[in-house]
Image: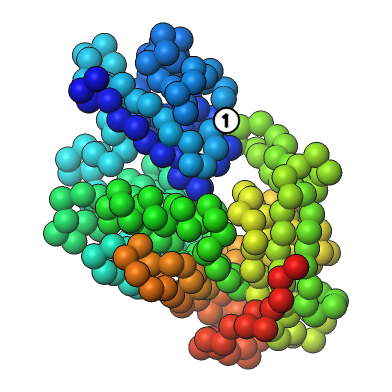
């Protein structure tokens, strides 16, 4: 049928409900209209009828029928209303571009800027992508996510082909992501692996991850780069899996919450003195197969509040060494 789209579920969309997946891609499609499309089999996942509560898997193919019918008004997420991005808001992303070629754009996402919209979130990267076209007709596409309060490297694909290749790399764990964090106290031993399953609990807007045997396997490697007496430590984190809030939950499981993470660490996560109350978690670098050839490696400078903490503790802001260079994963 003319106009039918077959869309592959991206790696970072693993586990989304079908209705949430449609909300992300077609935010203007009303829920009732989607239910009708599902009920009549016009929407299918891997060729099968599903309900709105069905959770999609990375790599699954969603059949989307033509949505030009006047009874099915929608605004595709890669076609926002003209003029929706103000010059002031555009600066939030354009001034933070740290890499760009014909395939990929990387930004150093500021802490506090959400990647995608949600209840009460009107400003987000997804809504600012028109500012990152740089002469291309197509908007860049999100291929992974960072928490709103986490800063650092965020990759965007400049074409559908690039998006598919990057999504495949994330799905196959070919992407190597290293995070920097300031944690309360000093972990002992000073390096190791956290292998603790995570399960999501709480209702909409109050979700949090807990350690639970019934959850999904979640693995993080950590290494103390430099301690500051017994008060805090600069820790490098390398997630093998990519669960929601994985690093934040695993830091608490280790007994050393990330500084500023009141959601998971409570009062213990805040240090007295001149240390910011913001979350001290930064996606420092990413290494991933380039969509065309070779390897893409991008490093993001620390956000301002983390720079302040590093300077206060006398830590090296320009350390570009790989703390996991000799890591043997088991």
Please state, as top left, top right, bottom left or bottom right, where the N terminus lies in the image: top left
Q: Where 229 falls versus 248 (above or below)?
A: below
| Residue sitting at x 55%, y 80% | 308
Residue 78: x, y in percent? 28, 41
Residue 213: x, y in percent? 83, 43
Front residue (pair 100, 118): 100
Residue 221: x, y in percent? 71, 69
| Residue sitting at x 26%, y 11% | 71
Front residue (pair 92, 180): 180
Residue behind mark 1: 55
Q: Where 165 falls versus 274 (above or below)?
A: above
Front residue (pair 103, 179): 103
Within 10 Å of disc 1 (Cα), the crowding (few <14, some 14-19, many 20+) is: some
Q: Quadrant of residue 292?
A: bottom left
Front residue (pair 52, 153): 52
Q: Where 214 falls versus 111 (above or below)?
A: above
| Residue sitting at x 72%, y 45% | 216
- Please, what secondary structure does the residue beneath circle 1 have? loop
Q: For residue 136, say whether it is visible.
A: yes
Question: How many numbered marks, from 0 up?
Answer: 1
| Residue sitting at x 71%, y 71% | 329
Horizontal placement of 1 versus 171: left or right?
left
Residue 223: x, y in percent? 72, 77
Please state, as top left, top right, bottom left or bottom right, where the C terminus lies in the image: bottom right
């Amino acid at each position: 049928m003319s106009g039918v789209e077959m869309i592959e579920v991206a790696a970072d969309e693993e586990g989304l409900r079908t209705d949430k997946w449609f909300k992300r891609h077609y935010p203007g499609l009303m829920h009732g209209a989607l239910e009708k499309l599902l009920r009549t089999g016009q929407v299918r996942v891997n060729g099968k009828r599903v309900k709105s509560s069905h959770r999609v898997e990375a790599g699954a193919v969603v059949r989307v029928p033509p949505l030009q019918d006047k009874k099915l008004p929608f605004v595709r997420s890669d076609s926002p209303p003209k003029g929706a991005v103000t010059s002031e808001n555009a600066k939030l992303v354009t001034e933070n571009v740290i890499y760009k070629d014909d395939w990929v754009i990387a930004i150093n996402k500021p802490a506090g800027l959400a990647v995608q919209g949600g209840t009460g979130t009107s400003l987000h990267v997804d809504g600012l992508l028109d500012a990152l076209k740089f002469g291309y007709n197509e908007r860049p596409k999100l291929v992974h996510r960072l928490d709103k309060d986490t800063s650092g490297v965020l990759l965007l694909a400049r074409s559908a082909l690039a998006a598919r290749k990057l999504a495949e790399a994330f799905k196959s764990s070919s992407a190597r992501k290293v995070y920097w964090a300031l944690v309360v106290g000093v972990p002992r031993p000073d390096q190791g692996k956290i292998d603790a399953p995570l399960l999501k609990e709480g209702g909409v807007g109050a979700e949090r991850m807990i350690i639970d045997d019934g959850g999904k396997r979640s693995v993080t490697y950590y290494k103390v780069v430099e301690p500051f007496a017994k008060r805090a430590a600069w820790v490098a984190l390398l997630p093998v899996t990519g669960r929601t809030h994985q690093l934040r939950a695993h830091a608490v499981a280790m007994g050393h919450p990330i500084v500023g993470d009141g959601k998971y660490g409570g009062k213990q996560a805040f240090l007295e003195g001149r240390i910011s109350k913001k979350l001290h978690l930064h996606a420092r670098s990413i290494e991933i197969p380039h969509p065309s050839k070779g390897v893409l490696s991008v490093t993001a400078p620390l956000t301002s509040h983390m720079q302040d903490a590093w300077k206060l503790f006398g830590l090296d802001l320009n350390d570009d060494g790989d703390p996991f260079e000799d890591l043997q994963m088991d």
